[in-house]
Image: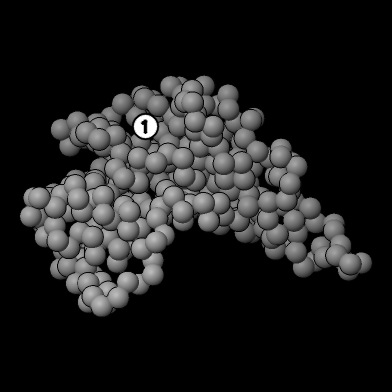
Amino acid sequence: MSNEKYRYDYNSLDEARGVLDSLAVGRVIDDWSLRGRDMNTWKHIVWNQSDDNPAAVVSPGYNLLQHREFFGKFLNAVEDVDYSIDTIEVVDERERAYMHVLFNETWLDDEIKAGIRAGNSFDKGRSAFVEFYALRLVCTNGLMGRKVFGRRSRIHVGDWETEVIVQNVKEIIPKSKQRLEELVDSSQEDFINTDLIRPLLRSIGFSKGLSDRVHNKYNDLGEVDLWELYNGVTYEVENNKDVRESYREGLHSKANDILVKSSDSLVNMAENELEENSDSDNGLDIIDDEVLQSVMD
């Protein structure tokens, strides 16, 4: 088990199943009133029973999915995958929770360890989902993002079964392998001038601090291929495990642009950023990762 307060590492499915009952439990309250007015036909409240506080105000059609139900079925589906388990990381953010499963399956000359990732919430913060996940062994930074590999997800509205989400777990790994190999091959052949790294990352939406650190890492090279740049960015993202998982996930989504956009498009983005900010600061430079995270929390 890790020392961090809400991230826990396990080495087997049985160990991971043992944490399910400790995850937060929600309850929909549909019989409440405000200033004497009956509100049950208009809005319901999701209450975090484990921590005894309100989690969200939802519509009457909201379908609450308990963490233990969703992740229990997810782990059952993982058990059917034809790879042995390396580690299972559980990220417990109370109303939101995530699982990252890594298998003993490596690709690209043992550079990438394949896995799968799932998430759920009962605070309207995110849909229930399952998607490909991987770890780059060279620098131990994660690789995720629906822009790159797609995602199987459902919002918490209407009638649907959890199996709709988890039934494709077994097929996600082989489908993602081909996609990853294609992306790595193409991105290793595309290069960008290192002078454009800082404005490119700012245009994508990264903070000045992160953009500066990545720029400084590669500046002496003159140019860098997009796969290396992507990994340089995700290393910075993964280097801070104290931020909320949803925030880290958002940064990964931004990093995906480096892989899915053409080099010409990325160059145009960087040049437009330089042109727009050539005469004056845009006011965002004072906001760094840590400050933004504290605001979001």
Q: Amino acid at mark 1?
A: Leu
Q: For mark 1, does the 10 Å Cα neighbourhood hold few (<14), some (14 to 19), or many (20 or more) residues?
A: many
For this view, does 24 lie left or right of residue 36? Answer: left
For this view, does 292 lie left or right of residue 182? Answer: right
Which of 23 and 219 lies nearest the eye of the viewer?
219
Residue 137 at least partly seen: yes
Picture coordinates of residue 61, whole percent (x, y): 69, 61
| Residue at the spot 28% in from the left edge and 56% down from the top edge | 211
Residue 21 picture quarter: top right
Which of 167 and 34 lies nearest the eye of the viewer?
34
Picture coordinates of residue 238, whole percent (x, y): 35, 42
Picture coordinates of residue 279, whole percent (x, y): 25, 78
| Residue at the spot 11% in from the left edge and 60% down from the top edge | 193
| Residue at the spot 41% in from the left edge and 60% down from the top edge | 287
Which of 71 and 194 lies nearest the eye of the viewer?
194
Residue 186 at least partly seen: no
For this view, does 193 lie left or right of residue 276? Answer: left
- Colouring scheme applied when the structure was drawn: one colour
Residue 85 picture quarter: top left
Residue assigned mark 1: 102
Picture coordinates of residue 284, whole percent (x, y): 39, 66
- Figure disc tally: 1
For this view, does 129 lie left or right of residue 185? Answer: right
Residue sitting farthest toward the right: 36
The local secondary structure at tag 1 comes to strand
Q: Is residue 200 above or below residue 169?
A: below
Q: Is residue 193 above or below residue 3?
A: below
